[in-house]
Amino acid sequence: MDDLRIQNAKVYINGQFEYTNVYVKDGVISRLASELYPASEIVDATHKLVLPGFIDPHVHFALDCGKNHSADDFYTGSIAAAYGGVTTIIDFLDPVDNVNDLELAYQRRLKEAQASVVDYQFHATIKNPKGDLEAFVKKVLELGMTSIKLFTTYSDSGRRTFDPQIKELLQLSRQYGVLITAHIENDDMIKIKSTDTFRDLSLSRPSICETSEALKLAGFVKETGGKLYMVHLSSGETLKRLKDEYLDLLNKQFFIESCPQYFVLSNDCLQQSDGFLYTMAPPIRSLHEQLILKNMIDDVFTIGTDHCPFMKAEKNHIFLKDISLGIGGVEHAFNLLYQIFSDQIIDKMTKNSALIHRLYPQKGQIAVGSDADLVIYKPENNYSIKTNHSRCDYDLYQDFPSAGYVDSTIVRGRFVIRNQQFENGKGHLVKRR
Ligand SMILES: [Zn+2]
């Protein structure tokens, strides 16, 4: 007998909705059938959608920034994620510059992540590397990760990886199948003066910083035949230029992740008296750029939130140099984007993420044999965001229009959220293929 039957549901299977019943046994989807078979527990999902659990491939829980820590650890952050229908998160190891420090960084993060109530994995992070990059790549794969994050900026804190090493990593990505994941901004163009305030953030990192560097890296991808994943694309102009000049690579070898904030917030917010709350890198852009980005949603491969909130007191400064950059959002990504893009957004938060980050077919789809990671979603008209389960003491998305709400979130067959209430959860480290 099956453990769970979700009945009368409109279920997202292979890119479309079907009316059927979802059965779960031992944490995996055991059958999809319109017939009624017995099960220990029966849940009725009439007038609700059943979606694959969302994958957020870009979160920063328990991030140590020296003077400050990000507001959420793996426990509170993953609870907020679960309230948003997220069943798997991918966080980042602390940046290291050599292979010897990699395993330590991995073990440290693994220990912290055990508090997560949803499933998890990691991207390795490299900074200004020294020594043998091939050994580094091999070690990443040996530790079960399939991606390495690098920064093209932050040379002032020693995190920038320079062009010759980027090319070498891309060559290795071709050879070993590892994915190079990159924070892309042109370091030489970023000019932050000590007198710059939060109102100057957009001007100190204009979108041309992102565009010029992304085009350069696309050139490297073409030259090396490697595979690159651009995190948090912020500018519509960047995406437009990439498509104009590198259509052959776009989402085949040069993959695009963007975040909810770049679709729903604009840089006017930075001019408000509480503009410091809206600070992140890359910054939110003009309404014009936001519109270009919205119109190009087809060319965005995945959605990640870059969830990295800081408490209000840590943001509440005039000068940019004193402000911890980053905002929250892990709980709200689907609500915000489903409202704008409807069904078009589902694959970008499920299957595409699972494919590129090698979690597929265990994650990212509703199919027999896949993990029973499921979201029961209730669409509503004229609805807005009212909850905030992050530990952060402010939430930019309160009262934003929402397409409905997450009724329940199920991870490997267990209810982590049931009827909008947190029950319990124990995340597992997911294997990447
Ligand atoms: Zn990030």
Image: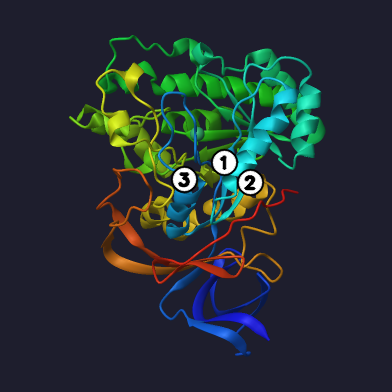
Instruction: Indicate the position of residue 376 as horizontal and vertical percent values.
Output: 47, 69
Relative side of 158 to 420, left or right: right
Mark nearer the N terminus (1 vs 3): 1
Of callouts 1 and 2, the N-terminal one: 1
Residue type for callout 2: Gln
Q: Is residue 59 left or right of residue 94?
A: left
Label 1 Cα neighbours within 10 Å, binned few <14 / some 14-19 / many ≥20: many
**Which residue is disc 3 drawn over?**
297
**Residue at the spot of label 1:** 91
Q: Say which amino acid is labelled 3.
A: Ile
Considering depth in this image, is 337 or 102 the residue closer to the camera?
102
**Measuring 37% from the left and 35% from the top, which residue is drawn there?**
310
- Asked if the residue at label 1 sits under 8 Å from ligand 1, the reply is no
- Residue 108 placement (x, y as % from top left): 63, 36
Q: Nearer the viewer, residue 13 or 432?
A: 432
Report the disc number at residue 121. Answer: 2
Q: Find numbered disc 1 in the image and state the secondary structure of the residue it sits on.
A: strand
Give the residue at x 80% y 24%.
134
Label 1 vs label 2: CA separation?
A: 6 Å
Does mark 2 have its CB less than 8 Å from ligand 1?
A: no
Mark 3 is surrounded, within 10 Å at the Cα level, by few (under 14), some (14 to 19) or many (20 or more) other residues, namely: some
Q: Is mark 3 on a helix, strand or loop?
A: helix
Q: In this view, does 49 lie above or below 394?
A: below
**Marks 1/3: CA distance?**
24 Å
Tell me the mark number nearer the camera, choosing from 1 and 3: 1
Percent coordinates x, y for residue 27 in the rendering: 65, 69
**Of marks 3 and 2, the one in the foreground:** 2
